[in-house]
Image (cartoon, rainbow, N blue to C red):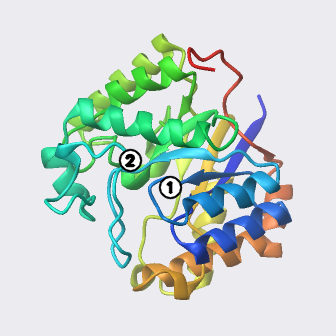
């Protein structure tokens, strides 16, 4: 079996700086997919930019705001998702404590319909800040997978989670993950073999070279089948705090000749998705 990888730039539309970097990386062929934050004021222009490149972004289901940016508002306005001022909290733990499943799915519907009104429907979805997975409180994985099955969407849920988490999951989380994979298979929702990304801060990494070495190790360890590496490339001035440095390093990595030589050496086929086409009920 061939090893294949989707190289995804997350957070298209987050703000103009990130959008600019992602659009350039797509045009240069350094990433093969991107995910769109529909609730951002920059989303409209971002969607237009990548459409002009012939790229259909995936839906980055977004239920929280971002620290350092003006608060986003949901498209559906469901009460359990918002603070008293009607904006999405920037703390995933707050959402995980109060969000109701029906409101989560209504908002996901609203974001999918927003994308449908502006171009071709995406073929896959995933979760901004990991809020659907139960990492910050309530899990909406079962509801999200049923929603994906209804709309004919693939979903970013790793069949093998260890490369993402860096080791075995805690028993309760491992059991929940096993149930979710079985449900995805039963529903016919395509999922990647595994996923990987950087989860360390700039102080923890210390340098660009350490981030690059970490991604090179992750690339070498990819299993057979189709997996996904997802990054968050941007400009340092577009993201406040040390996270901006890491996003700049990730943009640098994607253009680094050392990275491209490793892709050739590892004989990893770079592809645009881990899914096949399915018929949706609303297409």
Residue 79 image position (x, y, % from top left): 18, 45
At label 1, counting other C-alpha atoms closer than 10 Å, the crowd grade (few under 14, some 14-19, many 20 or more) is many
Q: Residue at x 54, y 15 (%)?
A: 188
Numbered disc in front, either 1 or 2? 2
Question: Dot 1 lies on which element?
Answer: loop
Q: What quarter of the picture does the N terminus occupy?
A: top right
Looking at the rendering, which quadrant does residue 263 occupy? bottom right
Q: Residue at coordinates 46% horizontally, 21% vertically from top-left? A: 184
Label annotation for residue 37: 1
Q: Residue at x 13, y 48 (%)?
A: 97
93 and 164: which one is in front? 93
| Helix, strand or loop under label 2 | loop
Residue 75 bears which disc, if any?
A: 2
Q: Give the left or right position of residue 154, taking residue 241 as reference.
A: right
Q: Is residue 238 visible?
A: yes
Residue 49 falls in image quadrant: bottom right
């Amino acid at each position: 079996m061939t090893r294949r990888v989707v190289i995804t730039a997350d957070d298209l539309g987050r703000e103009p700086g990130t959008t600019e970097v992602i659009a350039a990386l797509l045009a240069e062929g350094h990433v093969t997919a991107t995910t769109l934050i529909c609730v951002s004021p920059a989303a409209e222009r971002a969607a237009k930019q990548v459409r002009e490149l012939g790229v259909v972004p995936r839906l980055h289901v977004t239920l929280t705001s971002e620290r350092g940016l003006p608060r986003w508002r949901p498209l559906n306005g469901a009460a359990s998702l918002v603070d008293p001022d009607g904006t999405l909290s920037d703390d995933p733990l707050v959402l995980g404590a109060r969000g109701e499943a029906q409101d989560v799915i209504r908002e996901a519907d609203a974001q999918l319909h927003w994308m449908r009104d502006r171009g071709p429907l995406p073929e896959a979805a995933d979760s901004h800040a990991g809020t659907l997975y139960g990492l910050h409180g309530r899990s909406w994985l079962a509801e999200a997978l049923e929603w994906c099955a209804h709309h004919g969407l693939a979903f970013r849920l790793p069949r093998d989670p260890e490369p993402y988490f860096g080791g075995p999951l805690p028993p309760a989380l491992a059991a929940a993950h096993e149930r979710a994979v079985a449900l995805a298979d039963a529903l016919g929702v395509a999922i990647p073999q595994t996923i990987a990304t950087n989860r360390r801060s700039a102080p923890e990494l210390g340098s660009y070279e350490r981030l690059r070495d970490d991604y090179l190790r992750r690339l070498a360890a990819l299993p057979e089948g189709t997996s996904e590496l997802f990054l968050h490339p941007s400009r340092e001035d577009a993201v406040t705090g040390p996270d901006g440095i890491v996003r700049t390093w990730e943009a640098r990595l994607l253009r680094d000749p050392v990275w491209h030589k490793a892709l050739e050496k590892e004989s990893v086929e770079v592809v645009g998705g881990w899914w096949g086409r399915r018929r949706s009920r609303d297409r």
